[in-house]
Image (cartoon, rainbow, N blue to C red):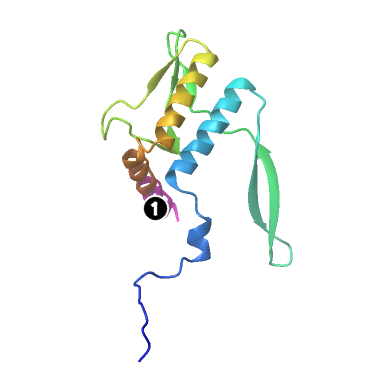
Amino acid sequence: MLQLKFSNEKKVLVSEARKKSPRQVVLDGIHNQVELLKNPNYTVERVRYSKGTEGGNTRLSISRPPQPWFWRSASGDNLLLEIRYGRTVVELQGQGMANTVIAGKTPADAIKLLEQIATAVKNGELDEPLEAAKIKARHRRNKVE
């Protein structure tokens, strides 16, 4: 008889292999926010599909500015921001707690804060809240469809 070693591991589907990890999704978003703070005219190229006249789908590339995660406080003296996984707010302190971060008075202060958060994401310090945001985003997407 052959001496074979067996494994329970399944082949990774192509659709699964293409998906970004929650860390990468947030890091891409942070990069976009830093660029938007540096240059208010910054745009990101996105791919959209539309129905063609002959029944097929047409692929369109459009450039749009990213949705800002930051805004001025009501008093106007501080920049505030929320970390997001797509459109879903990442609950950094836990569910029901305040998740808006005071970023400072200038865009440079906000950039420094975003870089600190990016370092924490790379080190895996925010994996639990990112996974929760991923699940929440998935539930939101399923409700819409």
List x then y, in percent, for residue 78.
Answer: 45, 11
Q: For the point 47% across and 38% down, which residue is it?
A: 26
The kind of secondary structure the magenta stretch mainly shows is helix
The answer to whether residue 73 is visible is yes
Task: Name the spot of residue 96 as percent of width and height, x first.
Answer: 26, 32
Q: Position of residue 117 (x, y in %)?
A: 43, 28
Viewed as shown, does residue 133 lie left or right of 37? left
Q: Residue furthest bottom?
A: 1
Q: Is residue 86 visible?
A: no
Relative to 86, does residue 38 appear above or below in the rendering?
above
Q: Position of residue 130 (x, y in %)?
A: 37, 41
Q: Magenta stretch?
A: 136-145
- Of residues 117 and 105, the one nearer the viewer is 117
The type of residue carrying mark 1 is Lys
Quadrant in the picture for the N terminus = bottom left
Q: Residue at x 39, y 46 (%)?
A: 134
Which residue sits at x=69%, y=55%?
59
133 vs 73: above or below: below
Q: Quadrant of the C terminus?
A: bottom left
The residue that mark 1 highlights is 143
In the image, residue 25 sits, relative to residue 92, either above or below, namely below
32 to the left or right of 58: left
Is disc 1 placed on a helix, strand or loop? Answer: helix
Location of residue 66 by image quarter: top right
Left or right: where does residue 139 sit relative to residue 16? left
What's the residue at 43%, 14% (across, down)?
A: 73
